[in-house]
Image (cartoon, rainbow, N blue to C red):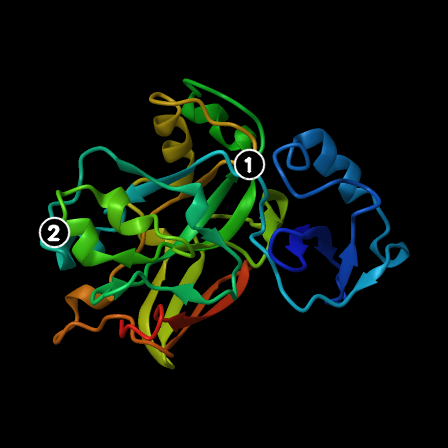
Amino acid sequence: MKLLRFGPQGQERPGMVHADGTVRDLSQILADIDGKALSSDMLRVLSQLAPDQLPIASPQRLGPCVAGVGKVVCIGLNYTDHALETQSSPPSEPVIFLKATSSISGPNDDVIMPPNSRRGDWEIELGVVIGSAGVNIPQADAMDHVAGYCIVNDISERSYQLKRGGQWTKGKSYDTFCPIGPWVVTKDEIADPQDLRMQLKYDGTIMQDSSTLKMIFPVKMLVSYISQFMSLHPGDVIATGTPAGIGMVQKPPVFLQDGAELHLSIDGLGTQRQKVVSQAGVPC
């Protein structure tokens, strides 16, 4: 299933994508696409619905595909080529940082840059959406805790990240810096999360073109590993890292400019498109 949220910001309604491509309204079935909706029991109920019997919606906007996210757990340097392009050694254990949930936005919402931002950057990532709670999860059981997958754009302000005290969270948590969606694709529809092509274009130019095959630490290992340090809860999102091709390492560097467009796609998970907008006329 493809589950989504649609409507104006703060007024989103739950929906699903029919096989014919139409969006069907689920608001008579459940309150929202949140942790409760992503439980195995509720997903089973939703899978038994007849989508053609549900009201057709004509959304003008798609919201973040998960409501009430408790935490966004991010993995740094999880692709060898990305580690090398940033002149970092590939890690022996996953690098973990958190992204503020206030940074979450819809898949096609504008990316609003901080005032005086000069080094905005992109990172296409496979998002893992948790469906059942767990702590100290054995790797053999890790996938039982996964509800599905989505696209995450880990927008960054590199000067905040690297020049303001060395804390990555500072550069990754501004409002609109975490577009997620367009939908959550339940795990039964993704045969192998470690074999998905991913691509990001900046103003039509392909900047990142890779595959989740190249992850250093695969999804099941990440779910188990993270749960050693914090409990995972339904609706939590894990952003699993980005491959090579970020703007910071281009020669010369390419940073987000006012009016530019980002287009992201991952096999089976849909597409995102964002416009970059500077604040109050301040150039990015």
Which amino acid, mark 1?
Answer: Gly
Disc 1 crowd, CA 10 A, few/some/many (<14, 14-19, 20+): many
The vertical placement of 30 against 116, above or below, is above
Which amino acid, mark 2?
Answer: Lys
The vertical placement of 216 against 183, above or below, is above
Could you say which is closer to the camera, residue 13 or residue 79?
A: 13
Q: Give how far across and how far down residue 222 sits, in percent.
A: 37, 34
Q: Residue at x 73, y 34 (%)?
A: 42
Q: Residue at x 43, y 57 (%)?
A: 176
Secondary structure under tag 2 reads helix
Which corner quadrant holds the C terminus?
Answer: bottom left
Residue under numbered circle 1: 235
Could you say which is closer to the camera, residue 74 or residue 88?
A: 74
Question: Position of 41 compared to 132: left or right?
Answer: right
Secondary structure under tag 1 reads loop
Residue 194 shows in the view: no
